[in-house]
Image (cartoon, rainbow, N blue to C red):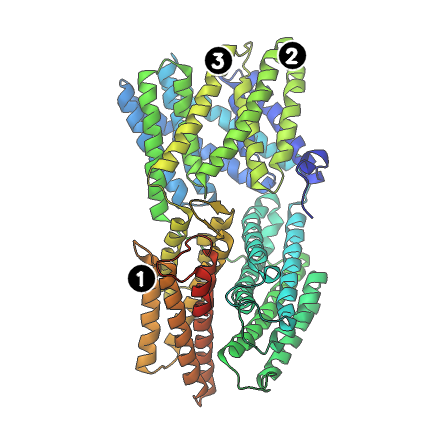
Amino acid sequence: MRMKPLAWLLTPSTDQLLFALRLCLAIALALYLSMWLALDRPYWASLEVAVMIQPAPGMALVRGFARATGTIVAGCAGLAIMAFFGQSYELSAAALALWVAFCAFWANVLRNNLSYGFAIAGFIAGVTVMLAHSLATPPFDIAVARVSECVLAALVTAAVNVLFSPPIGIRNYFNSRLALLRDLGREFIGLAGLSSHQPAAPGRPRSEDDPHPALQALAAQTLALEQTRQYLRYEAPEFANFDRLSRRLDYDILSLISATSSLHIYLAGHTETIDTRPIAALAEPARRLSEQPEDAEGAKQAFDDAHAAIRALADEPADHGRPRCLADYVVLSRALELASRGRAAMTTHGLLIAEREHPSKHISRRSEFSQPMDIRQALRNSLRTLTAVSLGGVVWVNFHTQLPAVLLMILLSSLTTIFATLPNPVAAAGGFAKGLALAATAAFVINFLVLPQAVGFPMLMLAMLPVVFVGGLAMAVPNPRLALPGRISVVMFALLVHVQNGALPSFETYIQTVLGIFGAIGLTVLAFRLVLPVSPRQRLREQMRGVFDELADGRRHTRERFETRMYDRLNSLALSEIDEPYRFSARQAVLAAINIGLEARSLVVLTERATLPRTLNDSVHREMDALRTLFAGRRPGSLDDIAERARAIHNLAAQLLAHGVALDRPAERRLVIRAAICAELVASALADYILAFEHGESPLTEPETANEATTNAT
């Protein structure tokens, strides 16, 4: 059921209400303490609270520490810039631009709290340098004031989260994981249901059988669950006792999604008659998983029975009465693998349920999840940041006495470092502009209609907190399109209200502040659009190049590392459909790219374990080199080239199968047949990749359409 547009406001959940109340309490307390301590700019403390607070209390604690550390580093960097270049506006602007670009680079390369810390280090250094030049205040005093306000906000945020957050973090995590298992069971039901379907139209799965939306949603749910898991120990220390199994189960689920993805896409687009009894055997474990995901033992037994049934089917003739073809082997092998992986996941799930009651003291530091460093994108965003801050520096050097120019540089330092870490900075700027528009309207009413009538701190809070409460409701919604503008509206509201001891903002100051913020948004968008512009399709190609670069040394790493890095590289690219001079399905392209990488890696590993004839072994390596060249070149191949590779790898799969079934040794025979299956699934994923662009590049370089190219490839 589609959520109504205003449901988050009219019928908020209990979690939304509690988070909004915590936000109001934290902002009120930070503002009161800042004014009581007579800090330079009390509104900075409330602004810091709005930035740091998170719906997950554990994440808020860690983010607060990262922000305080980044602020201290930024204060030192700002003092160093003023010490060396304080006598020159030009040199100060140049040094600040280089520092912010440096921080943007590391904010891109690193992840989570380290990334956040570097983003803050770039932003707060800009505050120190700009205010030191603009105010008759020593730089050290400004740096100390900023650090004091940030540390105060971090302490207040941590205290409010620890004291007033209900102990529901772990419960919500386990409920979310059960929901994920339930959704995975429904995907298994859909997969098993393909056994009774008629073949799809050539080259294109039927719309009702299109597995891409559900599979992409499952992958996104799993990665979000893994992100949440990392912070639960800070909210509930006892979670550390079973953190290891939770992490392993997250990977087991991701691995199940991968195996399901390639098989479901293969079947949805296949046209010939296949023996689908093996996947029909998965119907019972799928039903148990979708209806009772908490019954780990029952689901494990169902997967055990399905595994035995599929093994028995392997000894029987295919139900279509002909010798098994390559497609039959794909279905049989992958159904057996799904049953095996499902059994393993349910074993881990059962152990985790038991360990919640009798926790183990052993904590493993090895993680199945690994994130790649995208140096190319980090350098590109660093250059964009340098350009934007340098342009702002030119404005500031010529108008350094004007408040809009000062705010322009401060906000550029913030926006460029933060937006640089996002998959789509320009879209993020749009969300920022929406939040700013809402905040500017509310702040205008508060500043000039309410605050002049307010007497005392209670009246001030009575005026401000309703706006903060509504923003907090939006921040707690699990939808980035609503949560980001909600957070920005609260942050900008805290900045624009500009509360200080014994002073009210003037209309001129308000207008200048708004102009400076909008100017920073405009320059940020301009820099990210014009400096080394990269289309979404080019970014996908770059990520594919990273896939095949890692494939080159895939033997040295586990499947867990390779698989999680594939999802990390590609999953964020499918967060939205993209309109360019052409249109393509980002979701479908990403899933196809993931399957190409995973199946190609398995093909390489299996052929290295098997003893193949020299000609066949050379053919495998030749096709892998051709794939790497196709996706890793400066001018990637056209859809025709990809279709040609799909045909060649399909033929390679047939050769591997013919060689495998003729072998006498069972172990060697299984290895080669599995390699043939992986090759066939690589060809299927390449065909699926072509379909993702069928609305984007027609006509192709030859008269053939994308749909025809895909049909020929399969």
Between tags 2 and 3, which lies in front? 3
Q: Nearer the viewer, residue 482 or 400?
A: 482
Q: Nearer the viewer, residue 99 or 645?
A: 645
Q: Quadrant of residue 261?
A: bottom right
Mark 2–mark 3 Cα distance, whole angstroms, equals 23 Å
Q: Nearer the viewer, residue 61 or 633?
A: 633
Is the residue 15 above or below the residue 573 in the image? above
Is residue 326 visible in the rendered structure shown here?
Answer: yes
Q: Are marks 1 and 2 in contact (CB under 8 Å)?
A: no
Question: Residue visible at 29% across and 28% down?
Answer: 95
Mark 1–mark 3 Cα distance, whole angstroms, equals 57 Å
Q: Are marks 2 and 3 in contact (CB under 8 Å)?
A: no
* Res. 456 mark: 2
Q: Earlier in the sequence, mark 1 or mark 2?
A: 2
Q: Amino acid at mark 2?
A: Gly
Q: Quadrant of residue 339?
A: bottom right
Q: Quadrant of residue 328?
A: bottom right
Q: Is residue 697 left or right of residue 10?
A: left
Residue 345 location (% of width, % of height): 60, 65
Mark 1–mark 2 Cα distance, whole angstroms, equals 69 Å
Q: Amino acid at mark 1?
A: Thr
Residue 539 location (% of width, % of height): 39, 49
Is the residue 184 above or below the residue 168 in the image? below
Is residue 367 visible in the rendered structure shown here?
Answer: no
Read off the residue under disc 3. Answer: 509
Read off the residue under disc 1. Answer: 629
SS at circle 1 = helix
Question: Residue visible at 33% across and 27% down?
Answer: 391
Q: Earlier in the sequence, mark 2 or mark 3?
A: 2
> Of all residues shown, which one is farthest toward the front?
703
SS at circle 2 = loop
